Image: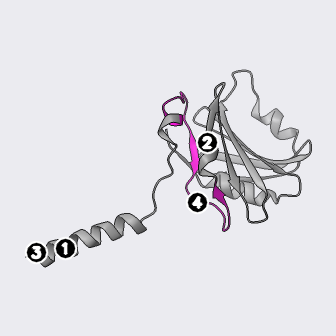
Amino acid sequence: MGSIVIVIAAAGLAFWYFAPHAPSLPANVKDQIRFSAFLPAELPPGYAIQENSYAYQNGVLTYRISAPNKVTVLATEQPQPTNFDINTFYKGLKNSRSAATPYGTAQAGQFLKSEVGTLTASGTWLLLSAPENTDSSVLLTILSHMKQTK
């Protein structure tokens, strides 16, 4: 009987350890946010969220995603401004591309001297910003794997 309990406990622990976990914000950041926040549930190979980079200031959530080539993608989230027209912003993107996500259509392209990816979801404006030589398909992949965390 005791060995059965040990086997069941070990199986449960293994499942918890190896099962994918939903992304989560640090508690001190999550408690401050008053809008729907999102995190990528999956990132492209070699990409990782810099765990110590989460910040929430002036109503904007920020965090950094490191890339294999030592490039950093800056992620920002904030409530969608009331007088903000996302379609006008999309028109300002050069060489833009789009991709369907569970929350709507994401757009990516060149903006000023950066490559950006953007999505509005559940009243939140998500913006990814990377150096101008970044492949926009990477930003669209990140946006397509966003999951609501709050």
Q: Which of pointers 2 and 1 lies earlier in the amino acid sequence?
A: 1
Q: How far apart are marks 1 and 4 (CA)?
A: 32 Å
Q: Are marks 4 and 3 in contact (CB under 8 Å)?
A: no
**Residue 119: numbered disc:** none
Q: Do the residues labelled 1 and 3 touch (CB within 8 Å)?
A: yes
Q: Nearer the viewer, residue 115 or 33?
A: 33
**Residue 2: numbered disc:** 3
Q: Which quadrant would residue 41 be assigned to in this image?
A: bottom right
Camera-near label (4 vs 2) is: 2
Q: Which of pointers 4 and 2 lies earlier in the amino acid sequence?
A: 4
Q: Which of 122 and 129 is in front in this view?
A: 129
Q: In this view, does 117 lie above or below 138?
A: above
**Which residue is the site of mark 2?**
54
Magenta: main secondary structure equals: loop
Tell me the element at label 1.
helix
Label 1 environment density (alpha carbons within 10 Å; few <14, some 14–19, many ≥20): few
- Residue depicted at 50% across the width and 43% down the height: 149
- Residue depicted at 68% across the width and 67% down the height: 46
Which amino acid type is marked by label 3?
Answer: Gly
Q: Where is residue 86 in the image (x, y as percent from the top left)?
A: 76, 34
Camera-near label (1 vs 4) is: 1
Residue range highlighted in magenta? 29-49
